Image (spheres, rainbow, N blue to C red):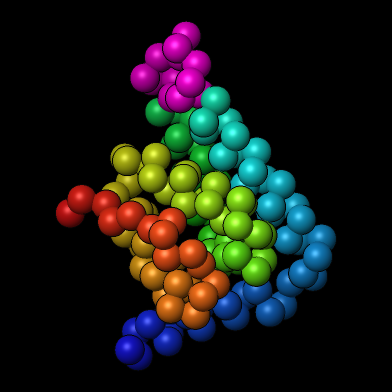
């Protein structure tokens, strides 16, 4: 319980000092663009596994930086579609299982407070 409260505080605190509207719109746009690119490269049969993985790794690095600086992009900040795009990007971070687990913990903490849809979450293999 204490860990969840501390995790929730560490996720929410950075959001309290940001200019909400402009930041949220920028973040939302970036997440939606990465999510669309993620899905497009999966559907593009001309792309090799290495090309797909390069896109996934770039998205992972960018999402990690965003989350580190601002906390998890939750529903009330970026909306359902962008929040789901962030979750999708985490799913394709297969080369970074520790990041997947960390993201899951943050999503679980937010789901406890209805700031994250619980049905977005999946647990990576151990």
Horizontal side of 61 relative to 2 (left or right) equals right
Instruction: Determine the residue located farthest toward the bottom in the rendered image.
Output: 2
Horizontal side of 20 relative to 74 (left or right) equals right
Tell me the quarter of the image containing the C terminus.
bottom left
Can residue 58 be spotted in the picture?
A: yes
Q: Quadrant of residue 49?
A: top left
Q: Is residue 30 above or below residue 106?
A: above
Q: Quadrant of residue 100?
A: bottom left
Q: Is residue 39 above or below residue 9?
A: above
Residue drawn 69% across the image and 54% down it: 27
Residue drawn 74% across the image and 72% down it: 18
Q: Is residue 52 above or below residue 62?
A: above
Q: Quadrant of residue 42?
A: top left
Residue 95 point in image, percent of width and height: 31, 40
Instruction: Work out whether residue 8 or residue 66 is closer to the camera in this orientation and state it.
Output: 8
Instruction: Determine the residue located farthest toward the left in the rendered image.
Output: 126
Report if residue 43 lies within the magenta region: yes
Residue 118 point in image, percent of width and height: 42, 65
Residue drawn 50% across the image and 37% down it: 58
Report if residue 29 lies within the magenta region: no
Instruction: Determine the residue located farthest toward the top in the rendered image.
Output: 46
Residue stretch rendered in magenta on the structure: 41-52
């Amino acid at each position: 319980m204490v860990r969840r409260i501390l995790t929730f505080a560490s996720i929410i605190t950075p959001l309290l000092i940001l200019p909400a509207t402009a930041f949220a719109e920028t973040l939302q746009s970036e997440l939606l663009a990465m999510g669309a690119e993620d899905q497009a490269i999966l559907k593009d049969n001309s792309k090799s596994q290495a090309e797909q993985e390069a896109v996934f790794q770039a998205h992972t690095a960018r999402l990690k930086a965003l989350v580190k600086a601002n906390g998890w992009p939750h529903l009330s900040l970026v909306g359902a579609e962008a929040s789901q795009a962030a979750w999708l990007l985490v799913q394709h971070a297969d080369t970074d299982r520790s990041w997947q687990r960390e993201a899951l913990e943050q999503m679980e903490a937010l789901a406890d407070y209805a700031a994250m849809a619980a049905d977005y979450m999946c647990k990576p293999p151990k």
